[in-house]
Image: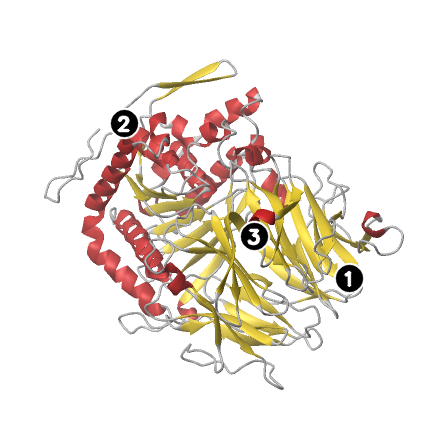
């Protein structure tokens, strides 16, 4: 293996060559030789040397993009209001918000007392602090001297006196939990290492509940910590023994109930405890039944339960008594409130004293409706004029609030925060994301852009939605470059939304499109079900159909089309590279799940057992093994001519391990024609890449510069 990065010269740099060490894998009578399995050991100095050599090669091949990368970075920076603050949210006697400061990487989390008669505090136009501000936590101070920084928990006690927060300085998502005294500003001795995201306070702030993970990084235990005592005395209050289940802890909106939610990909269960009695026992709302998923919202003296029981594929809403209410309590039968509708996927319900807010998905778009607190009566949808948009509940922490926040954006409308009055139906804009002029002085105007919904036809005749945005006047003769994005797993929907960074593409004549492929949730639960397990290949063929539709409709041509996806969307990228390499000029695969079969075969790896209900269990089921082997990207590389590939990963990623793209790129380079094939590894980051906003912009500028150059090569 050559580990020396190529020197800059007029000659084409030579890529590093990974040595081949045959390693056999045998399952269900099938023996496979894996020549690059040795790359899975991050403690091997030769592995690190290889990754650094790949970084050197990627740097050499992208060095010519320096000027373009700088221009794109300057555009992102210029268009972003760097000193800014979020819309304050009222919680009790305080307004809470965060703000950013020009030149600083991370947010500053703040609060300010509510003053008499204030419906909203005055918002400084320059993004400066509110008068009377108290800083709760400054991410820049915590991150000083660190290459990476992430917050995992951030929760103020109900009495407003303490802040529980957790930090990760490597990207491996192992957080250290701490407690800060907000009166003195001092960090208390309470410190818990290796915790998971989130935490929850008892009502009096005397106890803090947190989550830890097992050896496979599965969150499986909830602990109770009494503030001011040694963590050695902490007590496990809940342990999830089923390896398919993950859990989390939180509180109800009114903070009167502690909630543990544990779930697999198919089944869920919720436990409740009176937050005024933190030493008590949690009570199950409904014991788990395989295939039944439910979520709970506390609504005053009852529970609202969103569930898919009795064939309610797209979920329905029911009510039940609170634990301890009457003779039946949490074991009472669920009373229907909103019946199942085959054309509407219910996503969530937010309960307030005077109304309910229903969040749902219909016809590929999200929506919101207001209902009486009983859930029965007139359902009033909140309507918007644009053909494509994304809308959802905002921060609404108080049960008795008279108005509620919602968030809205589209592919041409920046993120907008509204207050909605459920009595009058009035929407009030509180803030719209500022988009400042570009470095050339050109101002952003939404009317300069247009968005469309297209429909591709998949191989089996299924119509697949595609969201498209471009600058007005972009030609539709196949000459425009295009970036097509996709994901298609876990029922996660990639909804049409706004992006400042995307403007650098659109203003260079690009078309941007989102392929809403099966495996996502855009068209309801069935859309997800038909893109997973033994129907996973629909995700890949749908994406190829979307790419070919964009070409046939004149939006672009195959020689100017670049595909992009990350994580499970990176699996999609690897699969379509094998399935239809001639359909794309380039592929960007970020933290890509491209060695899926090997990973899902190994139950000792993070996430594997929990993933068997998403992909199938190839370890025990020969049919699943054969099916996954037929599509997993790493094992299906051929000698065909592939498009250029840019893979990005992080050494400390615990979700998709770095060696998956490393092995994939090594095999592409050894077996396939075409390319070039680039691998860039962040040596101090996790699944989300670099953590500081300026660092993230630099990384995005590099990716966008590569996309621009790759799509322009045929022009």
The N terminus - image quarter: top left
Given the current orientation, which residue lies at the most extreme left position? 10
Helix, strand or loop at disc 2? Answer: helix
Circle nearer the N terminus (3, 2): 3
Q: Is residue 474 visible?
A: no
The residue where tag 2 is placed is 670
Quarter holding residue 680: top left
**Whole-number angstrom distance, CA of label 2 to CA of label 1:** 61 Å
Name the residue nearer the viewer: 295 or 214.
Answer: 214
Circle nearer the N terminus (2, 1): 1
Q: Is residue 659 visible?
A: yes
- The answer to whether residue 688 is above or below residue 154 is above
Residue 512's x, y, as percent?
A: 40, 54
Name the residue nearer the viewer: 577 or 308.
Answer: 308
The residue where tag 1 is placed is 375
The residue where tag 3 is placed is 230
In this rendering, position of residue 65 left or right of residue 156: left
Residue 404's x, y, as percent?
A: 64, 70
Helix, strand or loop at disc 1? Answer: loop
**Whole-number angstrom distance, CA of label 1 to CA of label 3:** 46 Å
Helix, strand or loop at disc 3? Answer: loop
Residue 683's x, y, as percent?
A: 32, 44
């Amino acid at each position: 293996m050559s580990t020396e990065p190529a020197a800059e010269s007029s000659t084409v740099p030579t890529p590093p060559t990974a040595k081949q060490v045959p390693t056999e894998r045998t399952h269900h009578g099938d023996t496979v030789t894996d020549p690059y399995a040795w790359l899975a050991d991050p403690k091997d100095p030769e592995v690190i040397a290889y990754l650094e050599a790949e970084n050197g090669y990627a740097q050499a091949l992208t060095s010519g993009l320096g000027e373009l990368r700088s221009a794109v970075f300057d555009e992102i920076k210029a268009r972003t209001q760097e000193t800014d603050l979020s819309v304050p949210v009222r919680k009790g006697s305080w307004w809470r918000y965060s703000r950013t400061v020009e030149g600083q990487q991370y947010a500053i989390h703040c609060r300010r007392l509510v003053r008499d008669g204030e419906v909203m505090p005055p918002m400084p136009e320059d993004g400066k602090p509110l008068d009377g501000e108290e800083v709760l936590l400054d991410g820049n101070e915590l991150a000083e001297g660190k290459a990476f920084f992430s917050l995992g928990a951030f929760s103020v006690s109900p009495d407003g006196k303490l802040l529980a927060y957790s930090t990760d300085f490597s990207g491996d998502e192992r957080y250290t939990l701490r407690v800060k005294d907000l009166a003195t500003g001092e960090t208390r001795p309470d410190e818990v290492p290796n915790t998971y995201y989130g935490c929850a306070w008892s009502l009096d702030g005397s106890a803090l509940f947190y989550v830890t993970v097992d050896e496979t990084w599965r969150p499986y235990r909830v602990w109770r910590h009494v503030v001011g005592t040694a963590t050695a005395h902490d007590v496990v209050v809940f342990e999830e023994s089923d390896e398919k289940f993950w859990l989390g802890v939180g509180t109800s909106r009114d903070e009167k109930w502690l909630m543990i939610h544990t779930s697999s990909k198919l089944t869920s269960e919720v436990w409740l405890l009176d937050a005024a009695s933190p030493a008590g026992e949690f009570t199950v709302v409904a014991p788990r039944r395989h295939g039944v998923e439910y979520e709970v919202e506390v609504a005053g003296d009852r529970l609202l339960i969103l569930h898919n029981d009795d064939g309610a594929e797209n979920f329905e809403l029911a009510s039940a008594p609170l634990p301890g209410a009457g003779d039946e309590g949490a074991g009472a039968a669920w009373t229907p409130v909103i019946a199942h509708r085959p054309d509407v996927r219910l996503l969530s319900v937010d309960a307030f004293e005077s109304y309910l807010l229903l969040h749902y998905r219909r016809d590929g778009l999200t929506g919101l409706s207001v209902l009486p607190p009983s859930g029965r009566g007139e359902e009033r949808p909140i309507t918007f004029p644009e053909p494509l948009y994304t809308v959802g509940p905002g921060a609404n922490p108080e049960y008795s609030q008279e108005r509620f926040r919602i968030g809205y954006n589209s592919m041409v409308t920046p993120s907008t925060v509204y207050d909605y009055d459920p009595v009058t139906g009035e929407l009030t804009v509180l803030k719209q994301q500022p988009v400042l002029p570009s470095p050339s002085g050109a101002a952003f105007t939404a009317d300069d852009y247009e968005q469309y919904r297209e429909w591709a036809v998949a191989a089996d005749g299924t119509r697949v939605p595609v969201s498209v945005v471009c600058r007005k006047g972009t030609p539709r003769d196949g000459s425009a470059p295009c970036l097509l994005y996709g994901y298609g797993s876990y029922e996660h929907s990639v909804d049409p939304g706004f992006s400042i960074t995307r403007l650098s593409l659109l203003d260079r004549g690009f078309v941007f499109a989102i392929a809403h492929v099966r495996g996502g949730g855009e068209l309801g639960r069935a859309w997800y079900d038909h893109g997973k397990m033994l129907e996973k290949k629909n995700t890949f063929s749908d994406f190829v159909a979307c790419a070919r539709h964009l070409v046939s409709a004149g939006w672009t041509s195959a020689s100017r089309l670049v595909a992009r996806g990350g994580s499970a969307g990176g699996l999609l990228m690897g699969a379509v590279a094998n399935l239809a390499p001639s359909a794309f000029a380039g592929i960007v695969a970020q933290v890509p799940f491209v060695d899926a079969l090997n990973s899902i075969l190994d139950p000792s790896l993070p996430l594997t057992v929990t993933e068997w209900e998403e992909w199938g269990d190839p370890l025990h089921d020969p049919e699943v093994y054969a099916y996954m082997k037929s599509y997993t990207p790493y094992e299906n590389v051929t000698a065909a001519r592939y498009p250029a590939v840019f893979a990005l990963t992080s050494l400390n990623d615990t979700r998709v391990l770095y060696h998956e793209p490393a092995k994939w790129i090594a095999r592409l380079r050894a077996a396939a024609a075409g390319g070039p094939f680039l691998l860039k590894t962040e040596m101090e980051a996790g699944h989300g890449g670099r953590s500081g906003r300026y660092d993230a912009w630099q990384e995005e500028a590099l990716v966008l510069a590569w996309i621009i150059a790759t799509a322009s090569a045929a022009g």
